[in-house]
Image (cartoon, rainbow, N blue to C red):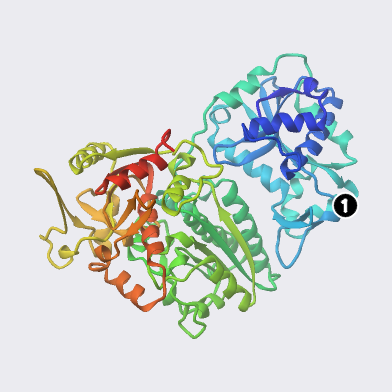
């Protein structure tokens, strides 16, 4: 919500405050006073406003539900001038309605705080961890904070939590937050909260517009989170910028790693991290390996690292990750022989068995103390891929794992826009819910293949992160004949001709690094991202406007794709769903822009109506 002055909003009731905030956050959606979020605002905001006003700081501005570019929201920010330097200052306030009776610090072996709310339980990370990460994010990304125009600090207000029991919030796994406990204020500590705020802020009656201006009018400097950061994960781990949903997951896994290394982990742990392309699953996996290695170095005299970063299959991703380097080497899951303390399985939707016999996937998973599964049901593209969320959850339950599931929703590709949500609506149907109207990346529908090839060549003069992709509808002749042309499409007097991507790992890494002379297929697409993609949309998946549904021409693919053909033949599978997944994967490789050419005009029209801004 836009910033408001404390001395003005102190006059409003909780309901009036919540009504105002609802209108700002939910725009035209009618007020729902039974909504849990609404009721939370109604109870918590008046409490904070009263504390600030009673401290004699009615001059401060309040920004509630401050939205970060990542999609997360900060409960409240107090804006004014610092008492010491009279420069703009922002104080982040994490507000919790927790009471002592409604939280459990440790439950079922999880190292998180479990909160009971309206009969529903949910896990939460420690509030000090939340505010610390907000500060880190702003310090690294907000322009005014980076240039020193705005200072940022934080505190936490647990207005229903009896201060008598506050010590419990800093015991055991949460001892690490004790050095910041003076910034946490519970019920009965309002006087101390007053003094804290008065020490930070000037009470002079002057307009705090400058503090508001530098917060809201400057831009965030978002950095790409993709394959290029892997070298930094080992060389400069502090430089890796994680955001809210990734941080929540990392915090819980790292607490289990701490317990493992301390010898207090009493059950095997499985963390299932789900998310669409571009939500940063791979970054989480690599960063966890790095964090584990750092923890081993700090805790043990020897540096025996019992961890592995694995892939079920994907020679291309392995070639890229190994080629980029940084000291973290990937291995194929079913090649593992030893047991591990930490096992990360990327592209985990691609596993083909959960066999508990030696050498089987189930056996390998069972040998680890902590397993982190990175998967997406909608990226399964072969009939024998069974790494679904439900299957992992079932396996964990049957094999004595404690399970936690984290869904990564925020897009780290495509400028945090709504592109992937719109693509999911296009491919799978339904309505796009609560996603940005802006796609977040440039989309250029090309009328001809000549237009697309010209656009790609021009872009390649300034960008080397650009690739052609297509579904597997042409024979791979060049695998055995380096001079053969694989893809040949004639439009009028123009013929588009390319080979498929190379076969060997060394050649694939060179192709990944910089090449527009070849076309990638689905098997070199998964897990990789580029600044720009040029997609040839063939008629193996086309939209029938008369029937208002997708038509799958499977034979156009399976005549050349022996993997898909055999797995469909040998497994009971919905091949329409697999074909949709293939196109979803191909459509979600770009970070900045995508060029698309359609063979079928009805498909093109449907894409434009659903995906392009202003047409939906």
Above or below: residue 287 compared with residue 504: above
- Who's the residue at 73% across and 59% down the image? 173
Q: Is residue 375 left or right of residue 520?
A: right
Residue 103 on image: x %, y %: 80, 55
Residue 169, can we see it?
yes
Residue 156, can we see it?
no
Q: Quadrant of the N terminus?
A: top right
Image quarter of residue 75: top right
Q: Residue furthest front?
A: 546
Above or below: residue 485 compared with residue 63: below
Q: Residue furthest bottom?
A: 357
Q: Secondary structure at mark 1?
A: helix
Residue 159 on image: x %, y %: 84, 41
- Residue 616 or 368: which is nearer the viewer? 616
Residue 280 on image: x %, y %: 49, 52
Above or below: residue 446 compared with residue 387: above
- Residue 454 or 281: which is nearer the viewer? 454
Q: Is residue 544 left or right of residue 30?
A: left
Q: Give the total of numbered labels.
A: 1
Q: Residue furthest top?
A: 206
Q: Is residue 193 left or right of residue 412?
A: right
Residue 115 on image: x %, y %: 76, 55
Q: Residues within 10 Å of mark 1 (few under 14, many from 20)?
A: few
Q: Quadrant of the C terminus?
A: top left
Which residue corresponds to mark 1?
Answer: 165
- Who's the residue at 36% across and 61% down the image? 579
Image quarter of residue 601: top left
- Residue 596 or 417: which is nearer the viewer? 596
């Amino acid at each position: 919500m836009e910033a408001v002055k404390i001395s003005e909003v102190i006059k409003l009731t909780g309901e009036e405050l919540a009504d105002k905030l609802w209108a700002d956050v939910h725009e035209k959606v009618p007020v729902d006073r039974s909504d849990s979020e609404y009721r939370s605002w109604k109870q918590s905001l008046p409490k904070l406003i009263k504390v600030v006003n009673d401290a004699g700081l009615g001059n401060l501005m309040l920004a509630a539900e401050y939205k970060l570019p990542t999609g997360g929201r900060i409960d409240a920010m107090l804006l004014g001038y610092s008492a010491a330097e009279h420069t703009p200052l922002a104080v982040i306030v994490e507000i919790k309605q927790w009471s002592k009776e409604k939280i459990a610090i440790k439950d079922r072996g999880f190292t998180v705080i479990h909160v009971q709310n309206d009969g529903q339980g949910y896990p939460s990370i420690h509030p000090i961890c939340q505010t610390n990460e907000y500060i880190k994010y702003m310090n690294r990304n907000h322009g005014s904070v980076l240039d020193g125009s705005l200072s940022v600090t934080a505190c936490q207000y647990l207005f229903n939590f009896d201060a008598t029991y506050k010590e419990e919030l800093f015991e055991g796994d949460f001892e690490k937050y004790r050095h910041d406990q003076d910034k946490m204020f519970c019920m009965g500590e309002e006087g101390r909260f007053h003094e804290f705020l008065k020490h930070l802020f000037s009470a002079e009656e002057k307009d705090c517009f400058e503090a508001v201006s530098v917060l809201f009018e400057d831009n965030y400097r978002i950095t790409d989170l993709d394959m290029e950061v892997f070298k930094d994960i080992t060389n400069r781990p502090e430089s890796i910028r994680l955001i809210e949903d990734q941080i929540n997951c990392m915090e819980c896994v790292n607490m289990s790693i701490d317990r493992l290394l301390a010898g207090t982990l009493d059950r095997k742990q499985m963390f299932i991290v789900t998310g669409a392309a571009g939500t940063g699953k791979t970054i989480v996996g690599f960063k966890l390996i790095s964090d584990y290695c750092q923890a081993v170095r700090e805790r043990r005299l020897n540096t025996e690292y019992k961890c592995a970063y694995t892939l079920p299959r994907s020679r291309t991703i392995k070639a890229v990750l190994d080629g980029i380097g940084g000291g973290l080497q990937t291995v194929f899951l079913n090649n593992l022989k030893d047991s591990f303390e930490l096992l990360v399985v990327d592209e985990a939707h691609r596993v083909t068995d959960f066999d508990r016999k030696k050498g089987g996937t189930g056996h390998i998973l069972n040998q680890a103390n902590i397993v982190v599964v990175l998967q997406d049901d909608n990226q399964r593209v072969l009939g024998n891929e069974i790494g679904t969320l439900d299957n992992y959850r079932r396996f964990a339950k049957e094999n004595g794992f404690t399970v936690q599931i984290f869904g990564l929703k925020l897009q780290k590709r495509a400028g945090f826009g709504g592109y992937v949500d719109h693509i999911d609506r296009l491919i799978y149907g339904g309505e796009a819910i609560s996603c940005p109207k802006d796609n977040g990346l440039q989309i250029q529908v090309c009328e001809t293949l000549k237009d697309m090839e010209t656009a790609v060549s021009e872009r390649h003069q300034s960008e080397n992160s650009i690739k052609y992709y297509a579904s597997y509808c042409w024979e791979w002749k060049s695998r055995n004949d380096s001079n053969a042309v694989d893809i040949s499409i004639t439009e009028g007097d123009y013929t588009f001709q390319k080979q498929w991507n190379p076969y060997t790992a060394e050649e694939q890494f060179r192709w990944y690094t910089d090449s527009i002379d070849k076309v990638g297929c689905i098997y070199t697409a998964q897990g990789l991202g580029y600044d720009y993609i040029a997609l040839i949309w063939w008629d193996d998946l086309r939209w029938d406007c008369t029937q208002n549904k997708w038509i799958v021409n499977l034979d156009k693919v399976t005549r050349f794709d022996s993997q898909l053909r055999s797995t469909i033949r040998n497994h009971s599978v919905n091949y329409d769903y697999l074909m949709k997944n293939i196109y979803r994967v191909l459509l979600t490789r770009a970070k900045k822009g995508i060029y698309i050419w359609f063979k079928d005009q009805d498909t093109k029209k449907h894409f434009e109506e659903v995906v392009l801004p202003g047409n939906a």
